[in-house]
Amino acid sequence: MKSPLTIIALVTAALAILLTGCSSPATSASATASASASPAVYTRPTEITSPVEAETLLKDGNARFVSGSILPKDLSQSRRDELAGGQTPFAVIVTCSDSRVPPELIFDQALGDIFVVRVAGNVIDPVTLGSVEYAAEHLHAPLVVVMGHTECGAVSAAVEGGEAPGDIAAIVRRIEPAVALAKAGGATGADLAAKSVLLNVELQTKAVEHSKILEELVHEGKLGIVGAEYDIRSGEITWL
Ligand SMILES: [Zn+2]
């Protein structure tokens, strides 16, 4: 015959098994509840053909970035597999290489969303323009954004003048016309650098607009081309 202590031990063990068995579904139910309460993963319509709709998506994304409410992104293997079958970026962003101006972050976009062309001073030359033409003509991205930014080092180099070393001169040369225009408008000091950034966006945007391929797409209503300035302090974008 078993002793009372043995019986108590057996009952305790049986209770422990019962409780463990019951706790498992309860745990998974609460995990499901907390997962559904987390922010939704960022998604967008697969096909975007309207320049206006594309601009709205970028404005909404920047508003989320500025307010600190960026959405989680699908960076899974299955998403990479899906995109390996083809990309449909909805916008081309031509902007500066400056590390403080990362387009995917400041527009709160994910894999496959934006086609980015980055070069110091966001200058347009045959190579960068060819990249824009490829994205617009071949990938059918409906919007091109030429975006400068405040406190741009490449623009400041052009404002300061003098001999730029090595191939940096090739970049500075393409910004000098904007600086000359700003000076002709009477800008001096810090105002000269700020005005030069805006005029550089204007001139580089015009260079994009002069592309025969892009001009045709704009004429057909399939493409929009806009200038913008990113403020590296506030995170906000001014559409020009
Ligand atoms: Zn810059």
Image: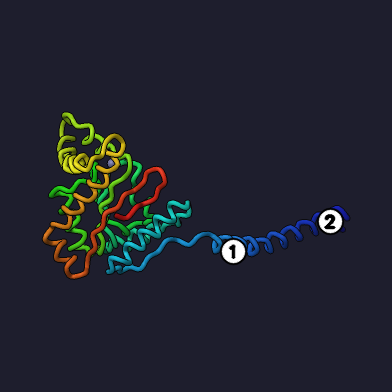
Whether ligand 1 has any atom under 8 Å from the Cβ at mark 1 is answered as: no
Question: Could you say where residue 236 lies in the image, as x and y percent from the top left?
Answer: 39, 50
Residue at screen point 30% across, 57% down: 114
Residue furthest to the front in view is 186
Quadrant of the rendered image containing residue 216: bottom left
Front one among 33 and 77: 33
Query: Is 132 placed left or right of 65 in the picture?
Result: left
Residue at screen point 47% across, 51% down: 68
Residue furthest to the left in view is 212
Q: Which residue is mark 2?
A: 8
Q: Spatial distance from mark 1 to mark 2, Cα to Cα? A: 37 Å
Task: State the mark number for residue 33.
Answer: 1
Label 1 sits on what residue type?
Ala
Q: Is residue 230 above or below residue 222?
A: above
Determine whether the residue tagged by mark 1 lies in a helix, strand or loop.
helix
Residue at screen point 31% across, 66% down: 52
Mark toward the start of the polypeptide (1 vs 2): 2
Query: Is 200 placed left or right of 126 in the picture?
Result: right
Label 2 sits on what residue type?
Ile
- Where is the C terminus found, in terms of image quarters? bottom left
Question: Could you say where residue 108 lies in the image, as x and y percent from the top left?
Answer: 39, 55
Front one among 171 and 16: 171
Q: Is residue 175 visible?
A: no
Q: Is residue 190 above or below residue 127?
A: above
Front one among 170 and 41: 170
Determine whether the residue tagged by mark 2 lies in a helix, strand or loop.
helix
Residue at screen point 24% across, 49% down: 201
Question: Could you say where residue 214 lies in the image, as x and y percent from the top left?
Answer: 16, 61
Task: For ligand 1, give the image quadrant.
Answer: top left
Q: Nearer the viewer, mark 1 or mark 2?
A: 1
- Where is the N terminus found, in terms of image quarters? bottom right
